[in-house]
Amino acid sequence: MGNREWIARDLRVLWHPCTQMKDHERLPLVPVRRAEGAWLEDFDGRRYLDAISSWWVNLFGHANPRIARAVAEQAARLEHVLLAGFTHEPAVRLAERLTALAPDGLARCFYADNGSSAVEVALKMSFHYWRNRGEPGRTRFVNLSNSYHGETLGALAVGDVALYKETYEPLLMRPVTVPSPDCFGVPRAEWDAHAERLFAHMEAALERHAGEVCAVIVEPLVQCAGHMRMYPPSYLRLLREACDRHRVHLIADEIAVGFGRTGTLFACEQAGIRPDFLCLSKGLTGGFLPLAAVLTTEEVYAAFYDDYETLRAFLHSHSYTGNPLGCAAALATLDIFAEEPVLERNRALAARMGEATAAALADHPHVGEIRQTGMILAIELVRDRARLEPYPWQERRGLRVYRHGLERGVLLRPLGNVVYFMPPYVVTEKEIDLMVEVAAEGIDLATRD
């Protein structure tokens, strides 16, 4: 069967994520038959360069033989066993590896199934910690404007992207939201000063809500689903100091930015800080299987360690917690980081991405900003460049870029009016040039009135 038949079958039974299904009356689905490296192939033999790592999960290429082999070998030994009262080698080895790689002091690993679930774990664990420590009045969380932490109700509550959150507001707890240190429109040389000015709002919120707050939750360095807005490591250093002063946990949501995306293995490393909770997923398994991990401190762990009758245990579970196949994929992914110069190679690729994009689009009349942190690059489309006036979201300019990309064999999935690149680490310089060329063509077409 070809594309047409698979599309017809799909539309009879499937409901796709993050999609207005009516769009597919005029925007054909892309059925993927196979994939290799940075490329996807449909049932008609057309190929697409995966410039967004299939929603930011793929690190070392599709069907990576090393990771695939590790999963197959594990499947032949043990596919799954409950992690309550049982354990297995891949879960133990992965927890050992993650706690060794993470910032010093993150000594305990709790597994979940996906990024949203990891955030739920961290929120509940922080709240429960304070309850166990005799401070039940700590029930609130502080977040940043324009933040995104997932789609389950707790994760959605501590996010701040109206598109995802507004409908469900009646169901959600109310965080204390402070302005993001997002540096859109700020010259790079002034990012630190801008972040320091914006931090005054965080400091004031922590003082105002002293004794009420469990934790502050942030996406370090890049607010990915919030249109790839970026800020400097200096903000994280100020935040760590303030959380310590006010006796508040710091939750680092590195689900999207972890595992080399920002130029270091974990984004927090660039600030030299250790969060109290580190949430990981997406790239953890190299894009093979759903798995998440929450790393925390021995101090947090100790607050739950007691006789059963005290009812202090953390009774949170998922059926597939610590799944051996996911853990095997993650271990193989970490082996690649350990044995190959991944971060060094990424620096060269990131430089090429930045240079090529600047050459093609720096002077474009409807490009308000090109910003980059490591292997994440974003291009913000604007109606008026001088005033950084955005296009109305209803015009869906980014969708025009997406459609052009598919016609030219490149998967670009803009966030509103922001076109971005977050390719797998196996992308070549030639493929980066193609990615930029097609994006520039699409932006030209999308910004013609």
Image: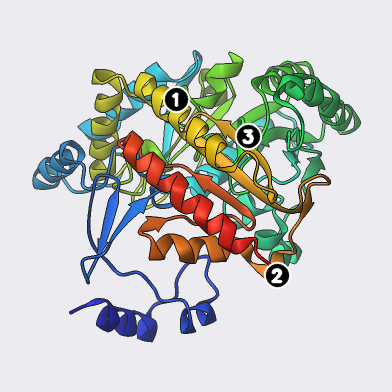
Residue type highlighted by circle 2: Gln
2 or 3: tag closer to the N-terminus: 3
The residue lying toward the viewer, choosing from 168 and 181, is 181
- Amino acid carrying mark 3 in the image: Ser
- Position of 181 with respect to 53 (left or right) is right
Please report whichever mark, 1 or 3, sits nearer to the chain's N-terminal start: 1
Residue at the location (25% across, 27% down)? 336
Q: Position of residue 187 (x, y in %)?
A: 74, 27
Residue 424 point in image, percent of width and height: 36, 40
- Residue at image position (48%, 46%) is 115
Mark 2 = which residue?
394
The answer to whether residue 66 is above or below residue 227 is above
Q: Which residue occupies the foreground of this view, 385 or 276?
A: 385
User: Which residue is nearer to you in this view: 422 or 438?
Assistant: 438
**Circle nearer the viewer, 1 or 2:** 2
The quarter of the picture where the C terminus appears is bottom right
Task: Name the side, left or right, on which 385 lies relative to 153.
Answer: right
- For image coordinates 73% across by 19% down, the residue present is 189
Q: CA distance from mark 2 to mark 3?
A: 39 Å
Residue 271, percent across and down? 61, 17
Question: CB of mark 1 within 8 Å of CB of mark 2?
Answer: no
Characterize the local packing of mark 2: few (<14), some (14-19) or many (20 or more) Cα atoms within 10 angstroms.
Answer: few
The residue to which callout 3 is attached is 126
Taking depth in this image into account, of 8 and 329 the one nearest to the observer is 8
The Cα atoms of the two marked residues, 1 and 2, are separated by: 45 Å
Check disc 1 and give the amino acid type: Arg
The answer to whether residue 388 is left or right of residue 358 is: right
